[in-house]
């Protein structure tokens, strides 16, 4: 039986009802159609509706099925092929949602499209950082060199894009990114007040890329003394997840940090590394502050509760 697409548009109230009502009616189509027909309906709607908010809702519904025909439609929307929608903020949001939905397919054939958008400096920064994030999610190391170039590029104006590219490199886990990321850290010495968020992402990525690299250890060690508490916290987490023999000794220094969140994260990291002994030490020794002692007591209560449950 053929599908009456125009009838569906009318029945769902497209053009006549509020966006929320229309999306609810489209969602209810699942009760009346088999998956194959439902996908055909979603694809038709994606091609024939010009309301970005409605399209976002339909993309989220179609994402449950991850059909290859839908993937082709999503790629067209991202690349603005056959799209007759005003260039508004809503269109940007639509393309961002589209990029995320495409990345959920984990299809390496889409990497070229994401690289094209990422490398287009005339593209809106939100689209570019969504594409960088997508490249990290897909996990194809073909993207590594392009992501490194974005992070290294002195003419790249968007720090948000650099941060997203750095995060993606951490997800991809390719050790070839270690030296370039460290080089960026060295090149920005004296300018990090302006680029502190990028530094946080670089430390986070280096932690994920760590393969017991001594240059990474040096960067993490220096970062424990950084002016940014978030950088210090990221360095603690990276050390906790590393194989460095010195990790525990280095993290211990942060138990006396001026910032409580840094001290708290150091305590949790040491607890994960060496167990209950660090909690007893913090609770018993007068050299540790009351806030940290209270945190240690809470962790100890959790530890004892879990022991009783075993």
Image (cartoon, helix red, strand yellow):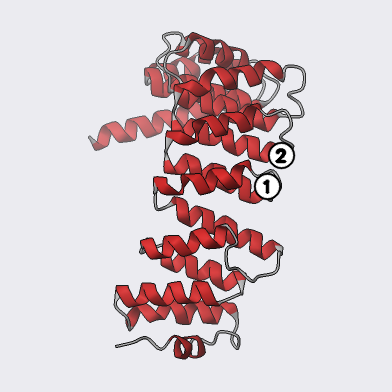
Above or below, 63 relative to 213: below
| Quadrant position of the N terminus in the picture | bottom left
Q: Is residue 288 visible?
A: no
Specify whether 18 is left or right of 8.
right
**How busy is the neighbourhood of tag 2: few (under 14 within 10 Å), some, or many (20 plus)?**
some
Q: Which element carries disc 2, helix, strand or loop? A: loop
**How busy is the neighbourhood of tag 1: few (under 14 within 10 Å), some, or many (20 plus)?**
some
Which residue carries the number 1 mark?
125
Extreme residue in the left direction? 310
> Between 134 and 285, which is closer to the camera in this rendering?
134
Query: Which of the labelled discs sits on residue 50, or is there none?
Result: none
The residue at the point 50 percent across, 58 percent down is 75
| Quadrant position of the C terminus in the picture | top left
Above or below, 247 relative to 199: above
User: How far across and down, in percent of the image, does residue 249 sit?
Assistant: 48, 9
Q: Are marks 2 and 1 in contact (CB under 8 Å)?
A: yes
User: How far across and down, in percent of the image, does residue 256 sit?
Assistant: 60, 16
Which residue carries the number 2 mark?
158
The residue at the point 67 percent across, 32 percent down is 197
The residue at the point 52 percent across, 36 percent down is 168
Residue 201: image quadrant is top right
Specify whether 248 is left or right of 89.
left
Above or below, 14 relative to 189: below
Specify whether 283 is left or right of 39.
right
Specify whether 52 is left or right of 244.
right
Residue 141: image quadrant is top left
């Amino acid at each position: 039986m053929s599908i009456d697409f125009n009838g569906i548009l009318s029945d769902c109230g497209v053009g006549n009802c509020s966006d929320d009502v229309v999306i609810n009616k489209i969602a209810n189509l699942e009760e009346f159609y088999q998956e194959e027909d439902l996908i055909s309906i979603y694809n038709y709607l994606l091609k024939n509706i010009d309301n970005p908010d409605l399209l976002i809702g339909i993309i989220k519904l179609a994402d449950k099925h991850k059909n290859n025909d839908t993937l082709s439609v999503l790629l067209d929307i991202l690349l603005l092929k056959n799209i007759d929608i005003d260039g508004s903020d809503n269109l940007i949001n639509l393309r961002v949602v589209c990029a995320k939905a495409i990345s959920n397919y984990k299809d390496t054939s889409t990497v070229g499209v994401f690289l094209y958008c990422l490398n287009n400096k005339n593209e809106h920064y939100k689209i570019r950082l969504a594409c960088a994030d997508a490249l990290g999610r897909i996990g194809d190391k073909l993207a590594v060199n392009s992501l490194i170039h974005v992070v290294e590029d002195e003419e790249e104006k968007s720090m948000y894009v650099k941060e997203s590219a750095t995060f993606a490199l951490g997800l991809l886990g390719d050790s070839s990114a270690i030296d370039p990321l460290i080089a960026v850290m060295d090149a920005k010495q004296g300018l990090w007040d302006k680029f502190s968020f990028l530094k946080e992402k670089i430390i986070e990525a280096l932690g994920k890329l760590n393969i017991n690299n001594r240059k990474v250890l040096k960067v993490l060690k220096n970062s424990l003394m950084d002016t940014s508490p978030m950088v210090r916290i990221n360095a603690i987490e990276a050390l906790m997840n590393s194989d460095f023999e010195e990790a525990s000794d280095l993290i211990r220094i942060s138990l006396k940090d001026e910032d409580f969140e840094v001290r708290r994260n150091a305590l949790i990291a040491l607890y994960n590394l060496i167990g209950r002994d660090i909690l007893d030490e913090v609770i018993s020794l007068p050299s540790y502050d009351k806030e940290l002692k209270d945190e240690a007591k809470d962790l100890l209560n959790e530890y004892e509760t879990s022991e009783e449950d075993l």
